[in-house]
Image: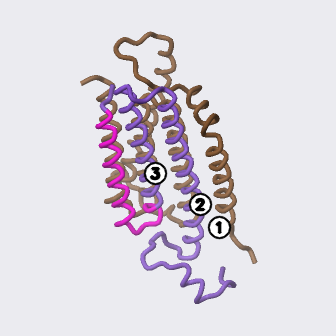
Chain colours: A brown, B purple
Amino acid sequence: MSLELAVFYFFGALGVAAASFLLVEGRTPISSSMAFCALGLAIAGVLQTLDADFLAVAQWILSLSAGLVLLVSSVMVAGVATESLDLASPARVLGKLAGGVAVAGLVGLLLGTMGDGVERSGPIALTPGTADLGQALFGAGAPLVFVLGLLLLVALVGGVILAKRRLD
Amino acid sequence: MIPHEHVVGLALLLFALAVLTVLLRRSLLALLVGVQGIFVSGALAVVGFAQGHAATGVESMARVSEAHGFALLVLVVAAAELSVGLAMGVAFMRKRGSVNVEGASVLRWWLRHGDSAW
């Protein structure tokens, strides 16, 4: 088994474990947020092994930022800060696992960046770079990008309106 | 080179687990994360299929780029869904003081209490 395949299986198993944990144990907001972070990071790792670098970085940023927002909002709004988090709690173990994967992924991305320019042996995979992705997105897919930008703006305004607190 | 069947199989497994989460869990955040998992597993399946077609020589680089761009757009839609869903969840948690959606029907609640209660 090659190292690439082993890394793929590791991240795949982590993603399945996180999704299963969410299904079985996701009763509290903290455990749900931790499972979300672990699932997102695992998917980012899988995308990295598939040479979809830009997608992996996007998923990396999305999972970490959205998981943090989920955690903070649930603690601030739902008042779950007093929820017991002993050392052996599943959420804490999963949080440590997600942190370890985040650090390992960051080191992997750094090593991958330093390794650029080195010729690789074996069959060359047909993997698009960032320039190809930009050409696809802003070439024929430009109208779709504009529509999705509008969707994000509507989601932003709608989120603010829905979540604002009325003071009267 | 990772076999694309493995990628699609992993995406299918994650999709099934996410759907089960949405159907079985009653925690609001678990529902949100489950829907997010559905989106992400779909994007992963798109990337896996594109890689499989590229390996067989059916697809060109431009087509694979389009597939990756489409997966990126799916991630954007997932982010938009998460932001709106989280805002709705914040409003729900303020009203109910709980993340349990069992028996919750905001529309019925609104009809009973009127607009002034909001």
Residue at 53%, 25% (x, y): give it.
A129
Quadrant, the N terminus of chain A = top left
Residue at 64%, 57% (x, y): give it.
A155
Kind of residue at disc 2 = Val
The residue furthest front is B58
Residue picked out by circle 1: A162
Residue picked out by circle 2: B84
Kind of residue at disc 1 = Leu
Q: Which residues are magenta?
A: B4-31
Report if the CB atoms under discs 2 and 1 are less than 8 Å apart.
yes
Say if the magenta span includes residue B2: no
Percent across and percent down for residue A149 are 66, 48
Residue at 40%, 47% (x, y): give it.
B41
Report if the CB atoms under discs 1 and 3 are less than 8 Å apart.
no
Instruction: Give left or right: position of A17 versus B110.
Output: left
Task: Give me the disc on residue B39.
Answer: 3
In the depicted structure, whether residue A82 falls above or below residue A150: below
Residue at 50%, 15% (x, y): give it.
A116
